[in-house]
Amino acid sequence: MKSGFVAVVGRPNVGKSTLVNALVGSKVAITSPRPQTTRSVVRGVLTSGDAQIVFLDTPGLHRPRTALGERLNRLVGGTLAEADAVVFVLDATQKIGPGDRLIAERLGEAGTTTVVAVNKVDLAADDAVVEHLAVAGEWDFDAYVPVSALHGENLQPIVDELVELLGEGPAYFPPGTVTDQPEEFLFGELIREQFLARLRDELPHSLAVVVDEIVEQDNGVVRIEARLVVERDSQKGIVIGAGGTLLKEAGSDARREIESLLGAQVFLDLRVRVEKDWQRRPGLIDRLGM
Protein backbone atom coordinates (compact mmCIF):
# COMPACT_ATOMS: atom_id res chain seq x y z
CA MET A 1 0.00 0.00 0.00
CA LYS A 2 0.97 3.66 -0.24
CA SER A 3 1.61 5.35 3.11
CA GLY A 4 3.55 8.14 4.73
CA PHE A 5 3.67 11.08 7.12
CA VAL A 6 2.63 14.43 5.66
CA ALA A 7 3.39 17.67 7.49
CA VAL A 8 0.85 20.46 7.04
CA VAL A 9 2.71 23.77 7.27
CA GLY A 10 2.14 27.47 6.73
CA ARG A 11 1.94 30.81 8.48
CA PRO A 12 -0.46 31.25 11.43
CA ASN A 13 -4.17 31.36 10.64
CA VAL A 14 -4.03 30.05 7.07
CA GLY A 15 -6.39 27.19 7.99
CA LYS A 16 -4.03 24.27 8.60
CA SER A 17 -6.06 22.69 11.40
CA THR A 18 -9.34 23.16 9.55
CA LEU A 19 -7.78 21.48 6.52
CA VAL A 20 -6.50 18.51 8.54
CA ASN A 21 -9.93 18.03 10.15
CA ALA A 22 -11.58 18.16 6.72
CA LEU A 23 -9.14 15.73 5.13
CA VAL A 24 -9.47 13.23 7.99
CA GLY A 25 -13.22 13.68 8.22
CA SER A 26 -13.18 14.17 11.98
CA LYS A 27 -12.23 16.89 14.46
CA VAL A 28 -8.72 16.02 15.60
CA ALA A 29 -7.41 19.59 15.97
CA ILE A 30 -9.06 22.65 17.50
CA THR A 31 -9.52 25.76 15.37
CA SER A 32 -9.56 29.45 16.19
CA PRO A 33 -8.83 32.77 14.46
CA ARG A 34 -6.16 33.35 17.13
CA PRO A 35 -2.49 32.91 16.12
CA GLN A 36 -0.62 30.03 17.80
CA THR A 37 -3.81 28.06 18.46
CA THR A 38 -1.89 24.87 17.59
CA ARG A 39 0.89 24.30 20.12
CA SER A 40 1.93 20.75 19.34
CA VAL A 41 1.99 18.40 16.39
CA VAL A 42 -1.46 16.85 16.03
CA ARG A 43 -1.73 13.65 14.02
CA GLY A 44 -4.77 12.98 11.86
CA VAL A 45 -5.02 9.64 10.08
CA LEU A 46 -6.73 9.08 6.73
CA THR A 47 -7.05 5.50 5.51
CA SER A 48 -8.57 5.24 2.04
CA GLY A 49 -8.42 2.13 -0.12
CA ASP A 50 -4.82 0.97 -0.37
CA ALA A 51 -3.37 4.14 1.13
CA GLN A 52 -2.86 5.59 4.58
CA ILE A 53 -1.78 9.20 5.10
CA VAL A 54 -0.82 10.46 8.55
CA PHE A 55 -1.26 14.24 8.52
CA LEU A 56 0.87 16.21 10.98
CA ASP A 57 -0.83 19.50 11.84
CA THR A 58 1.91 21.91 12.92
CA PRO A 59 1.99 25.30 14.66
CA GLY A 60 2.16 28.29 12.35
CA LEU A 61 5.68 29.48 11.59
CA HIS A 62 6.11 33.01 12.96
CA ARG A 63 8.64 35.45 14.42
CA PRO A 64 8.89 34.23 18.03
CA ARG A 65 8.70 36.61 20.99
CA THR A 66 8.77 34.06 23.82
CA ALA A 67 10.40 30.76 24.73
CA LEU A 68 7.13 29.08 23.76
CA GLY A 69 7.23 30.71 20.32
CA GLU A 70 10.81 29.59 19.76
CA ARG A 71 9.89 26.06 20.79
CA LEU A 72 6.92 25.97 18.41
CA ASN A 73 9.14 27.00 15.48
CA ARG A 74 11.68 24.29 16.37
CA LEU A 75 8.83 21.81 16.55
CA VAL A 76 7.83 22.65 12.97
CA GLY A 77 11.42 22.26 11.80
CA GLY A 78 11.74 18.86 13.42
CA THR A 79 8.46 17.71 11.93
CA LEU A 80 9.55 18.76 8.43
CA ALA A 81 12.76 16.79 8.81
CA GLU A 82 10.82 13.61 9.57
CA ALA A 83 7.96 14.00 7.06
CA ASP A 84 7.70 12.08 3.79
CA ALA A 85 5.84 14.96 2.14
CA VAL A 86 4.37 18.38 2.91
CA VAL A 87 1.12 20.20 2.31
CA PHE A 88 2.06 23.90 2.25
CA VAL A 89 -1.05 25.99 2.97
CA LEU A 90 -1.50 29.53 1.62
CA ASP A 91 -4.35 31.90 2.48
CA ALA A 92 -6.03 33.13 -0.72
CA THR A 93 -7.48 36.14 1.15
CA GLN A 94 -4.02 37.50 2.01
CA LYS A 95 -1.13 38.54 -0.17
CA ILE A 96 1.76 36.09 -0.36
CA GLY A 97 4.26 37.62 2.03
CA PRO A 98 7.80 37.18 3.39
CA GLY A 99 6.67 34.42 5.78
CA ASP A 100 5.22 32.38 2.92
CA ARG A 101 8.33 32.91 0.81
CA LEU A 102 10.60 31.88 3.68
CA ILE A 103 8.71 28.60 4.10
CA ALA A 104 8.83 28.01 0.35
CA GLU A 105 12.57 28.64 0.36
CA ARG A 106 13.14 26.15 3.17
CA LEU A 107 11.08 23.50 1.45
CA GLY A 108 12.86 24.11 -1.84
CA GLU A 109 16.30 23.86 -0.25
CA ALA A 110 15.33 20.62 1.48
CA GLY A 111 13.92 19.16 -1.73
CA THR A 112 10.79 18.11 0.17
CA THR A 113 7.92 16.61 -1.84
CA THR A 114 5.33 19.39 -1.57
CA VAL A 115 1.70 19.95 -2.50
CA VAL A 116 0.61 23.60 -2.26
CA ALA A 117 -2.97 24.12 -1.04
CA VAL A 118 -4.37 27.59 -1.73
CA ASN A 119 -7.03 27.75 0.97
CA LYS A 120 -10.10 29.94 1.63
CA VAL A 121 -11.04 30.18 -2.04
CA ASP A 122 -14.66 30.56 -0.88
CA LEU A 123 -13.75 33.95 0.59
CA ALA A 124 -11.33 35.21 -2.07
CA ALA A 125 -11.93 36.80 -5.45
CA ASP A 126 -11.17 34.60 -8.46
CA ASP A 127 -8.31 36.81 -9.59
CA ALA A 128 -6.71 36.56 -6.12
CA VAL A 129 -6.81 32.76 -6.32
CA VAL A 130 -5.29 32.84 -9.81
CA GLU A 131 -2.56 35.21 -8.60
CA HIS A 132 -1.68 32.91 -5.69
CA LEU A 133 -1.48 29.90 -7.99
CA ALA A 134 0.70 31.85 -10.44
CA VAL A 135 3.13 33.10 -7.79
CA ALA A 136 3.31 29.73 -6.04
CA GLY A 137 3.87 28.07 -9.41
CA GLU A 138 7.22 29.84 -9.61
CA TRP A 139 8.40 27.76 -6.64
CA ASP A 140 8.31 24.61 -8.76
CA PHE A 141 6.66 22.29 -6.25
CA ASP A 142 4.94 19.02 -7.11
CA ALA A 143 1.26 20.06 -7.23
CA TYR A 144 -1.04 23.05 -6.64
CA VAL A 145 -4.64 22.73 -5.45
CA PRO A 146 -7.19 25.50 -4.68
CA VAL A 147 -9.41 24.44 -1.77
CA SER A 148 -11.94 25.55 0.81
CA ALA A 149 -11.13 23.60 3.96
CA LEU A 150 -14.06 25.18 5.80
CA HIS A 151 -16.59 23.91 3.26
CA GLY A 152 -14.71 20.71 2.32
CA GLU A 153 -14.36 21.75 -1.32
CA ASN A 154 -11.79 20.19 -3.68
CA LEU A 155 -10.08 18.09 -0.99
CA GLN A 156 -9.88 14.85 -2.96
CA PRO A 157 -7.28 16.24 -5.41
CA ILE A 158 -4.92 16.81 -2.45
CA VAL A 159 -5.36 13.19 -1.36
CA ASP A 160 -4.92 11.94 -4.93
CA GLU A 161 -1.72 13.94 -5.39
CA LEU A 162 -0.27 12.70 -2.10
CA VAL A 163 -1.10 9.07 -2.83
CA GLU A 164 0.66 9.45 -6.19
CA LEU A 165 3.73 11.04 -4.57
CA LEU A 166 4.11 8.79 -1.51
CA GLY A 167 6.04 5.54 -1.66
CA GLU A 168 5.07 2.02 -0.67
CA GLY A 169 4.85 1.48 3.06
CA PRO A 170 2.99 -0.16 5.96
CA ALA A 171 -0.28 0.81 7.59
CA TYR A 172 0.88 2.73 10.66
CA PHE A 173 -2.54 2.66 12.34
CA PRO A 174 -5.48 0.21 12.37
CA PRO A 175 -8.43 0.96 10.06
CA GLY A 176 -10.86 3.42 11.62
CA THR A 177 -8.20 5.31 13.58
CA VAL A 178 -8.38 9.08 13.04
CA THR A 179 -5.82 10.24 15.63
CA ASP A 180 -3.39 8.87 18.17
CA GLN A 181 -3.70 11.77 20.60
CA PRO A 182 -4.37 10.72 24.23
CA GLU A 183 -7.70 11.66 25.81
CA GLU A 184 -6.02 14.14 28.16
CA PHE A 185 -4.65 16.10 25.22
CA LEU A 186 -7.91 16.05 23.22
CA PHE A 187 -10.07 17.12 26.15
CA GLY A 188 -7.64 19.87 27.14
CA GLU A 189 -7.66 21.24 23.60
CA LEU A 190 -11.46 21.20 23.41
CA ILE A 191 -11.59 23.16 26.66
CA ARG A 192 -9.00 25.67 25.42
CA GLU A 193 -10.89 26.13 22.16
CA GLN A 194 -13.98 27.38 23.99
CA PHE A 195 -11.98 29.97 25.92
CA LEU A 196 -10.09 31.10 22.80
CA ALA A 197 -13.46 31.91 21.22
CA ARG A 198 -14.30 34.25 24.09
CA LEU A 199 -11.04 35.90 25.15
CA ARG A 200 -9.43 38.99 23.64
CA ASP A 201 -6.09 40.77 23.25
CA GLU A 202 -3.04 38.92 24.55
CA LEU A 203 -4.91 36.62 26.93
CA PRO A 204 -5.47 33.71 24.47
CA HIS A 205 -1.68 33.33 24.17
CA SER A 206 -1.33 33.31 27.96
CA LEU A 207 -3.78 30.46 28.50
CA ALA A 208 -2.80 26.80 28.83
CA VAL A 209 -5.07 23.91 29.80
CA VAL A 210 -3.86 20.82 31.63
CA VAL A 211 -6.13 17.84 32.29
CA ASP A 212 -5.10 16.33 35.62
CA GLU A 213 -7.54 13.47 36.00
CA ILE A 214 -10.17 11.51 34.07
CA VAL A 215 -12.28 9.12 36.14
CA GLU A 216 -15.34 7.12 35.14
CA GLN A 217 -17.56 7.06 38.21
CA ASP A 218 -19.81 4.22 39.33
CA ASN A 219 -22.87 6.00 37.93
CA GLY A 220 -21.26 6.14 34.46
CA VAL A 221 -20.50 9.86 34.59
CA VAL A 222 -16.95 10.74 33.48
CA ARG A 223 -15.36 13.26 35.84
CA ILE A 224 -12.64 15.43 34.29
CA GLU A 225 -10.47 17.74 36.38
CA ALA A 226 -8.56 20.41 34.46
CA ARG A 227 -6.38 23.42 35.25
CA LEU A 228 -6.61 26.66 33.31
CA VAL A 229 -3.17 28.25 33.63
CA VAL A 230 -2.66 32.00 33.08
CA GLU A 231 0.31 34.32 33.64
CA ARG A 232 -1.11 37.07 35.88
CA ASP A 233 -3.69 37.54 38.63
CA SER A 234 -5.60 40.02 36.46
CA GLN A 235 -5.96 37.34 33.78
CA LYS A 236 -7.39 34.92 36.31
CA GLY A 237 -10.31 37.25 36.92
CA ILE A 238 -10.93 37.64 33.18
CA VAL A 239 -10.99 33.88 32.61
CA ILE A 240 -13.42 33.37 35.48
CA GLY A 241 -15.60 36.31 34.42
CA ALA A 242 -18.03 38.36 36.50
CA GLY A 243 -19.66 36.02 38.97
CA GLY A 244 -18.00 33.08 37.24
CA THR A 245 -20.05 33.58 34.07
CA LEU A 246 -17.30 33.07 31.49
CA LEU A 247 -15.92 30.01 33.25
CA LYS A 248 -19.41 28.50 33.42
CA GLU A 249 -20.34 29.35 29.82
CA ALA A 250 -17.11 28.12 28.19
CA GLY A 251 -17.02 25.09 30.47
CA SER A 252 -20.57 24.11 29.53
CA ASP A 253 -19.80 24.27 25.80
CA ALA A 254 -16.56 22.32 26.29
CA ARG A 255 -18.43 19.70 28.32
CA ARG A 256 -20.94 19.22 25.49
CA GLU A 257 -18.12 18.80 22.96
CA ILE A 258 -16.45 16.16 25.14
CA GLU A 259 -19.75 14.37 25.76
CA SER A 260 -20.30 14.20 22.00
CA LEU A 261 -16.85 12.68 21.60
CA LEU A 262 -17.22 10.18 24.46
CA GLY A 263 -20.90 9.33 24.10
CA ALA A 264 -21.22 9.64 27.87
CA GLN A 265 -22.27 12.20 30.48
CA VAL A 266 -19.38 14.37 31.70
CA PHE A 267 -18.78 16.37 34.87
CA LEU A 268 -16.15 19.00 34.11
CA ASP A 269 -14.27 20.50 37.07
CA LEU A 270 -12.28 23.59 35.95
CA ARG A 271 -9.86 25.49 38.18
CA VAL A 272 -7.84 28.58 37.29
CA ARG A 273 -4.21 28.87 38.40
CA VAL A 274 -1.58 31.60 37.94
CA GLU A 275 1.94 30.65 36.81
CA LYS A 276 3.76 33.93 36.31
CA ASP A 277 5.15 34.42 32.76
CA TRP A 278 4.94 30.69 31.99
CA GLN A 279 5.47 31.29 28.26
CA ARG A 280 8.99 32.55 29.00
CA ARG A 281 9.99 29.71 31.37
CA PRO A 282 11.18 26.61 29.46
CA GLY A 283 11.00 24.36 32.52
CA LEU A 284 7.39 25.32 33.18
CA ILE A 285 6.51 24.88 29.50
CA ASP A 286 7.77 21.31 29.88
CA ARG A 287 5.64 20.70 32.96
CA LEU A 288 2.59 22.02 31.14
CA GLY A 289 3.07 19.33 28.52
CA MET A 290 4.25 21.45 25.60
Image (cartoon, grey):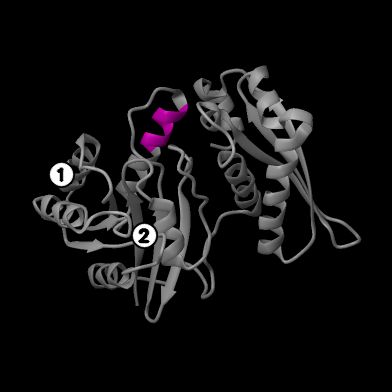
Q: Secondary structure at mark 1?
A: helix
Circle 1 packing at 10 Å, graded few (<14), some (14-19), many (20+), is few
Say which residue appears at 54% left-offset and 33% top-offset: 204
Q: Split into 4 quadrants, where in the image is the N terminus? A: bottom left
Callout 1 amino acid: Glu
Residue 65 position in % (x across, y down): 40, 22
Callout 2 amino acid: Phe
| Nearest to N terminus: mark 2 or mark 1 | 2
Q: Looking at the rendering, which quadrant does residue 153 occupy? A: bottom left
Compared across the picture, whether 247 is left or right of 24 comes to right
Q: Looking at the rendering, which quadrant does residue 265 occupy? A: bottom right
**Mark on residue 23?**
none
Q: Main secondary structure of the magenta part?
A: helix
Q: Is residue 200 magenta?
A: no
Span shown in magenta: 68-74
Q: Nearer the viewer, residue 266 or 76?
A: 266
Say which residue appears at 18% left-offset and 63% top-offset: 143
Q: Secondary structure at mark 2?
A: strand
Circle 2 packing at 10 Å, graded few (<14), some (14-19), many (20+), is many
Q: Nearer the viewer, residue 236 or 218?
A: 236
Point out the residue furthest to the bottom here. Answer: 49
Q: Is residue 171 positioned above or below 229 on the image?
A: below
Judging by the rendered image, the residue that carries numbered circle 1 is 109
Q: Looking at the rendering, which quadrant does residue 18 occupy? A: bottom left
**Mark on residue 5?**
2
Residue 89 position in % (x across, y down): 29, 52
Say which residue appears at 54% left-offset and 59% top-offset: 180
Mark-to-mark CA distance, 2 and 1 = 19 Å
Q: Is residue 39 positioned above or below 84 on the image?
A: above
Say which residue appears at 67% left-offset and 31% top-offset: 239
